[in-house]
Amino acid sequence: MVVLGILALELLCVYVLGRRLLDGLVSRAARSGPLRRWATWTVLAPGVTLHEASHAVTATALLGRVVRFVPFAPRPLPDGGVLLGEVRWKPSRLPVLGGAIGRALVGLAPLLLVPAVVYAAGCVLVPGVALGDPPVDLVGGLFGDGASVGGVLWLLLALSASIGLLPSPVDHQDLPRALILLTLAAVAWVAWRGGVDAGDGTRLLTDAAAPLSFLAQLLAPPAAVALAGGALLRR
């Protein structure tokens, strides 16, 4: 499916160029004077806050317990980096929710929840767009009747969220085991059903096309920001 290729390209942009953009902005801000540093923190604060909140919300939804929640408070690290925000949590004692799959869901939560919140905010702030409309309609709403205050506010939020949504390396530490477990579960399910014939396989792809297209549109702004920002930082 074409949409799967688009999603793969978007994730590649977010992870490679998005990481370069975020690291470049943070490192330059840390070495700059107070004015530039605080300007950078102002741009990053909404996105990082949404990032950390998505970890906390998902951990709580999976019956975990959040023991420390710092939405945005930049502080230098011994290795020269900067910690922008932090969430510490204890997983549930239930096998799946507190296991590798649950921990991976908490770690990767920003990739889905942050774009979803940005989309919902756009449906409120951008004229002529309502919940349920395709995310691409937000672009048309921004320029349909000229610029609006709500549209400008949404653009600023989308920019900040696009930079701050990327999960950190520690958020991915349980992903390999989670993928292995999910693959084994999928294989077991297919074997239990006696295999998937051509009709079932085609219907599965058809049913998945609409949600995958919606997800690709949600991830388009972060991918575009990563592509543009990552390229500009190379100069």
Image (cartoon, rainbow, N blue to C red):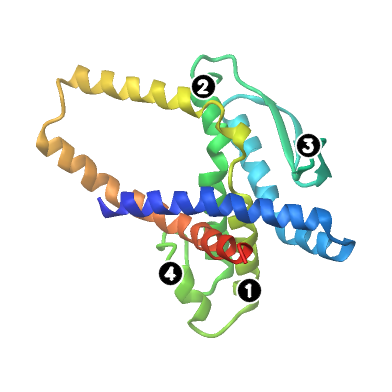
Mark 3 or mark 1: which is in front?
Answer: 3
Whether residue 178 is visible, yes or no, is: yes
N-term-proximal mark, 2 vs 4: 2
Camera-near label (1 vs 2) is 2
User: Badge 4, how many Cα within 10 Å: few under 14, some, many 20+?
Assistant: some
Residue 118 lies left or right of residue 74; in this view the side is: left
Please give the residue where the numbered disc 4 appears in the rendered image: 137
> Measured from the top left, where is residue 163 in percent x and y?
62, 55
Under circle 2, the secondary element is helix
What's the CA distance linking mark 2 and mark 4? 37 Å
Q: Secondary structure at mark 4?
A: helix
Q: Residue at x 54, y 15 (%)?
A: 94
Kind of residue at disc 2: Ala
Of badges 3 and 2, nearer the viewer stands: 3
Of marks 2 and 4, the one in the foreground:
2
Most foreground residue, 73 or 176 = 176
Q: Residue furthest bottom?
A: 146
Spatial separation of the CA atoms under disc 4 and disc 3? 43 Å
User: According to the image, label 1 marks what residue?
Assistant: 152
Q: Amino acid at mark 4?
A: Asp
Give the residue number, with chain letter if any, for mark 3: 79
Of marks 4 and 3, which one's residue comes earlier in the chain? 3
Residue where numbered disc 2 is placed = 100
Q: CA distance from mark 1 to mark 4?
A: 16 Å
Query: Which numbered disc flags the more N-terminal residue, 1 or 2?
Result: 2
Q: Which mark is residue 200?
A: none
